[in-house]
Amino acid sequence: MNLGGSLTCRFERTGNLEDISAAISLRTRAVHLTPEGHTDLPIHLMNLGGSLTCRFERTGDLEDISEAISLQTRAVHLTPEGHTHLPIHLMNLGGSLTCRFERTGNLEDISAAISLQTRAVHLTPEGHTDLPRRLMNLGGSLTCRFERTGNLEDISAAISLRTRAVHLTPEGHADLPIHLMNLGGSLTRRFERTGDLEDISEAISLQAHAVHLTPEGHTDLPMHLMNLGGSLTCRFERTGNLEDISAAISLRTRAVHLTPEGHADLPSRLMNLGGSLTCRFERTGDLEDMAEAISLKTRAVHLTPDGHAHLPNILTNLANSFLSRFQSLKNDSDLSEAIARQTRAIELTPESHASLPSYLTSLGVLLRQRFQRFGNVSDISAAIARQKQAVDVSSKGHAQLPGFHTNLGTSFMMRFGHTHDPVDAENGISNLVQALQLTPDMHAELPPRYMILASAWFQYFTSRLLNDFYPCSTSVLTAFGTALDLLTSIAGLEQTVQHRFTMVGEFLSIPGEAAAAAFRLGRPDRALEWLEQGRCLVWGQQSQLRTPLDALNAHDPALAARLLFVSQHLESAGSSRQHSSTSNSWDRKASHEADALKHSQMASERDRILGHIRAIPGFETFLQPLRCTAILSHLPRSGPVIVLNVHQHRCDAIALQDGSDEVLHIPLPSFTLQKAKWYQRMLTAQLKEHQRHIQDVEQTSELSCGRAARPYNAKAQDVHGVLEGLWRGVVRPTLDALGFLVDEDPVNALPRIWWCPTGPLSFLPLHAAGVYKGMQVESVADYVVSSYTPSVAALTQRVENDAPIDDRVSGLFLTSQPTAPGAPRILGTVKEVSAIHTKAQELQIRALNLSGDAITPKECLERMEEYSSIHLACHGIQETLNPLRSRFVFHKGGLDLNSVMQKNLPNADLAYLSACQTSAGQESLPDEAVHLAAGMLAAGYRRVVSTMWEIGDESASQVASDFYQYLWSRRPEGSGSRFDGTLSAHALHYATQQLRDRLGNTNASLLAWIPFVHYGY
């Protein structure tokens, strides 16, 4: 028996089947030599069962595990009540039943295991040295059953038991690290089900502590490193935080390096490291990560012998990496490799295996990808067959069954899009509905599944309408309404702002698609509500955190004070906290995870407070998404707001006018999403061909000091086509519907208009749309003064809260940064700022000019609090991967968007950003207004002048000079030292038209003044 035990130990280390087979042979002989009634027979039966279980875990042979359970059951029956070994035998038999359950998915096995292990715990007295371990094992079995059924009661009970085990394990005990690790594992499983960041933050904290307590050279250290890396990977998949996935890869790389060649766990560790690298690749597109992931997983396959129980899972993981690379590079050989590996995994998986439905679904996804690639209907039909098989072989109550239905429904809808067979659509929607019905409340996948169903309904709805059929529109509206309501839970306040932007980026199409459906149903009011609810989501959240609480304070001062405290904490944490686990300092890691946990707890506390507030009569809609009537309140009196939606099925405008209680729907039948994307590509190509992001018609001597100026390239495509297309397709029909196409008036008599575009229109110059060639020259500037707003709410909140600016703060702060390190010289900014400052002093306006080395970014932030308006003449940099790091370039560092966002400036008036690309936006987040101009609005500025792309130094100075001259000439008498930016939109209109008049309507001159834009009130 003892020799068999040693051979079993060596097998667990090496995976050598000869060792475990020899162990089983020896232990079988020992059992045969032990007579019936001998006191050692139960323990010998139990040990033989243990060795058989070990071999089963390696080979997956059900005969081994069934024999093990039979032997261990006999051992339990031979152990009398009250015997000290009975709890041990009950626990071990429960462990073997759990192993068989993980292979077959038979709920009877796991329920029996839990029953046996519960009995073992009850037989173990308080204070017994084995009690923590038995609590931990029972928690493990409950966790296994949860993974199969998704029953939250099981995982909550597991966490409770394992928490108790940790509390009963004294500091310094050898079992403490593994207990901490296992408790963290159960918390991670619950996080995967609910998406609650408190759970994953606590899991990471516990597992990091376990790693910290495990000495170098300990055999458990690689396992602990691997598990901590797994939890960090899980959090990354939820938040998109690159620091988490980089830390995970670092930890898992170390685990692999600590695992010697020949170790039984090496293949699984290689696979897990490859999985984390694949996750990072899917976020960054770094092909080196993907090449390494495939190499590691291929090595794992080669190290795993035929017949190994884990080989199908490793093959499936390798297939997933090939699929990810295919989706990025569209290399057909990658897709073929993925299908081959997944097919092989299925061939190696017995029909009774619990993982078979998952493997079948994965193969269906791969076949669906091949259908999208080549359009062969046989592929999508094969995908449907495989995914239907997955649903059919899954037992009722399986935790993954809703996901299987979702995939099957998606495949049916894809075939419907090709064949237009209504039976496919009905089957698709039926499966998607069933997926939702089977998805528990608060499940992390609930929001995206609603969005998939909403899109399917709209696809079916649109197709049937085209054929003169009219299905129930209520289903479409309900599905989209629920999807939009759940969108905020995907990017909740428990996450940092940057991570919320990442999450929102995954569901960009939903608000626009919902609005298109509402327009189709004759509900422009719902379209407006949904566009407001789903666009600029992150900015809207930040704005909510600063909502005035006057009414609530009058009703319940203590409740208002608590909400204010929590909101301020969330705003600070959201903008400044980083989930960092890459530090080598344990204390620093622990501090970061404590901050993450506190952040999540504060978000939950805010939800509880809001629930309490909404239960108060009169506060039922407090901080809820606005209905149409509320959106129409507090509109500016000086002109309409135009919300534009572009979708593949239709394009529309909504005009909102002060004094009207209804929206004006303006269909745009001649405009399409394809045109918008084409105009965007045309404009981008022109800017690139000019060898800078705009061509300035200035002398080549400006090359050494221009804001990215370059010589004019006569071969560049003509921008006139873009502007004329926008004019005829979008702007002219809108102005015509509003009755604005009349003879132009003097500039100060023109009405204002606010453009609120979506999608690719967010990157196109609507304010410059027009015909600039031929005899009939006309443009938007002839009829209105244009401004932009990120959302309607961003504008109406300014109108509603337009309080007078404190005289002590009213003034203009100016800075230029002409020779910032690493940036082209922009010497014209010095003259620009100096001239404005000199004129302000002549007019006795309160003004301050600190430029170059005389000011740091931090000091600039301080001056923003002391002066109501700011003029920044410097370079601006737009960060693509991390928009919150977009920044103004100073001689002594950078003033980034994240720092600006954290400011709350109640007396802020005008921000004039005479810098490059300050409203260029983030192409992957077109509806989130992630640019420096929006950041200034978020900080409190009521109006912002910015640029859509790079500007020439001389043009920038001319526009700035004319802009301020317009404001100076219209200062009311008695203004004293005050600075007032109220007329900034008219001032910019005047200044850009002056530049246009000087330069004419050539392609180059248009590109000189088009980038200047006005945001806000």
Image (cartoon, rainbow, N blue to C red):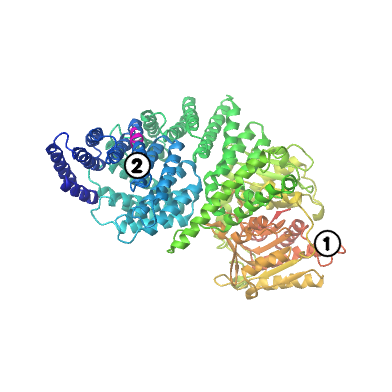
* Magenta highlight on residue 114: yes
Residue 601 visible somewhere in the drawing: yes
Give the residue drawn at x 13%, y 35%. Answer: 35
Tell me the residue at 68%/73% (across/down).
850
Residue 970, which numbered label? 1
Type of amino acid under label 1: Arg
Q: Quadrant of residue 994?
A: bottom right
- Magenta residues span 112-116
Report helix, strand or loop for mark 2. loop
Mark before the other along the chain sequence, 1 or 2: 2
Say which of 602 and 732 sits in front.
602
Residue where numbered disc 2 is placed: 124
Task: Look at the image and tell me in which quarter the N terminus lies.
Answer: top left
Q: Is residue 853 above or below residue 48?
A: below
Residue 624 appears left or right of 20: right
Near-viewer residue (621 or 108): 108
Q: Position of residue 346 (x, y in %)?
A: 30, 37
Which SS class for mark 1?
Answer: loop
Q: Which of the 4 image quarters holds residue 734?
A: top right
Residue 320 at what x, y percent from top left?
37, 45
Main SS class of the magenta portion in the image: helix
How far across and down, in percent of the image, does residue 594 sit? 50, 56
Label 1 Cα neighbours within 10 Å, binned few <14 / some 14-19 / many ≥20: few
Q: Is residue 38 left or right of residue 167?
A: left
Say if the magenta span includes residue 288. no
410 relative position to 319: left or right: right
Q: Residue at x 60, y 50 (%)?
A: 538
Q: Is residue 670 visible?
A: no
